[in-house]
Image (cartoon, helix red, strand yellow):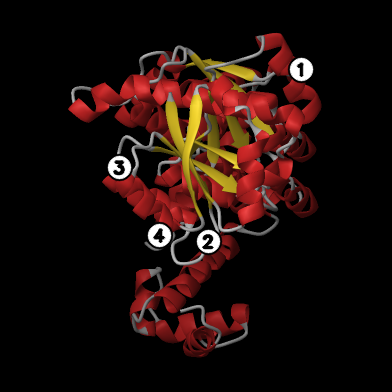
Amino acid sequence: MIRAIVVDDERLVRKGFIALFDWTSFGITIVGEAADGKAALELLEQTEVDLLFTDITMPRLSGFELISQVRQRYPRVRSVVLTCHHEFDYVQEALRLGAIDYIVKTLLEPESADEVMSRIVARLEWEIGNLGERLLGSEEEKLQASEALLFYPSNREENSNELLRLAVVKRNPLLAVKEMWLVPIMHSLSRAEMNRELAHSLSSRWQPVWITGLYGQPLDEVKRELAESMADELFYKQRPNDEPLELRYDELKDTAAERRKGLGGNELSSSDGMSMKWMLSAPDWEHFIGKIEQQRPSFECIVAFGEGLCADWRGLLMKESESLAIRSDIRRNHTWAEWRLWLRRFSDHVQRRMMELGFSKEVMLCLIRAIVYMRQHSSGKLSQADVADYVKMSRSYFSQCFAKLAGEPFGVMLRRMRIERAKTLLLETDTPVYEIAFAIGFEDDKYFSKLFRELVGRLPSEYRADGALNGTR
């Protein structure tokens, strides 16, 4: 028989909870009750107890403090939280402290009471079954379920109340995994019934994922792997037919291991001239996309790549208005499928621009490489002849094509690049103005200051002082 006590500072609530259940039918006997945490600890000193039901908000010693002390002093006693709070932060804290389950008192009805208690007893039996091995220290806690449902939120501030009402959550243990929630399926309906409930009762704010192949896996390892890899895994996976995605745990582990070894890379650059070929031809596009799908860079890397494309090539590879429009769409891309369409659109803009200018793919790529080369070498002595030679074009033809693409002569763009570099150095360093002038390719610092004022509207020293006042330094 399972010996249990009930702790709640409201006497009528405590008595009502005890009266609600046919305890003997669940193999439970109530061996005591207490009005607060201090009284509960005194009762535990005198009474052998297996299961503790406790409220959270109580005088003298809160439910959180009680659970924590019980776990340290009576490791065989399991705790269940009684709460009126719907917010998951309360539940999550209790689970973090070691509670095996929770009951939302405001949602507890006579018709659902038996189902709730059956879930708790099943969880307790599972805990007891694994307790011996854990106390002996011979083996870490392992999952006894072959599959689990993972609930992944659309954002970290997601309201989680709706999960509490799902039958699969009511019948099975709930484990916190970073901002996600894992439900090992110990007692379940059929998979089809659970999928139907998820489709009808779960909003789009949560993405459910079936994780299979879990039986016997160390729980701490599973939590770690899911926390580290689930965001990137879901970014690349397509959800089929509006049903929950299904992932095998061993495959997920292998993918994560490859990423940790560096086999999956973040080798994407918006300023690599040769890699820009994907914008100009179908075969290079397919190769580029295939490389991303094989390497699986992180979501953050893909976003940075897209932002870089827009920042580096606005007004050059597409019109200014087109660049602003496509950049504003970046925040709408949440999956790789959406990013793939975005990159296709970017490529289409570039090819349209190429046709408007009347350039061949070879000439367009040469000009892209020329601009990248200029950015990399603008601080040194650099001439139009140097760049034309680098991209293997005649000086006169290069000059003509460059001005057509950039909308300004080579020398004007080069000076503008140097001035932009100077602005960064003025705001981010204390380097003297004359040293900055020399560092970006000007031999005469007076000429540099004059040109800077013409293009920026202030002297370099004034620009630096304004930046300090505005908090940009």
Residue 29, position as x, y percentages in the image: 49, 30
- The local secondary structure at tag 4 comes to helix
Judge whether 77 appears above or below 236 on screen.
Answer: below
Of the residues under marks 1 and 3, which one precedes in the sequence?
Answer: 3
Which residue matches tag 4? 38
Which residue, given by chain and number where applicable, does mark 1 sit on? 196
Label disc, if present, on residue 74 of the rendered structure? 3
How many residues crowd around disc 4 within 10 Å: few (fewer than 14), some, or many (20 or more)? some
Camera-nearest residue between 380 and 213? 213
From the top left corner, tell me how far across and down residue 161 is, in percent. Answer: 69, 43
Q: Residue at x 53, y 44 (%)?
A: 81
Nearer to us of marks 2 and 4 is 4
Quarter of the image for the N terminus: give it.
Answer: top left
State the residue position of label 2.
Answer: 58
Residue 157, horizontal then vertical, whole percent: 63, 51
Amino acid marked by disc 4: Lys
**Marks 2 and 1, Cα distance to the nearest angstrom?**
40 Å
N-term mark: 2 or 4: 4
Residue 296's label in the rendered image is none
Q: Are marks 1 and 3 in contact (CB under 8 Å)?
A: no
Tell me the distance, in whole angstroms, between the alpha carbons under discs 3 and 4.
15 Å
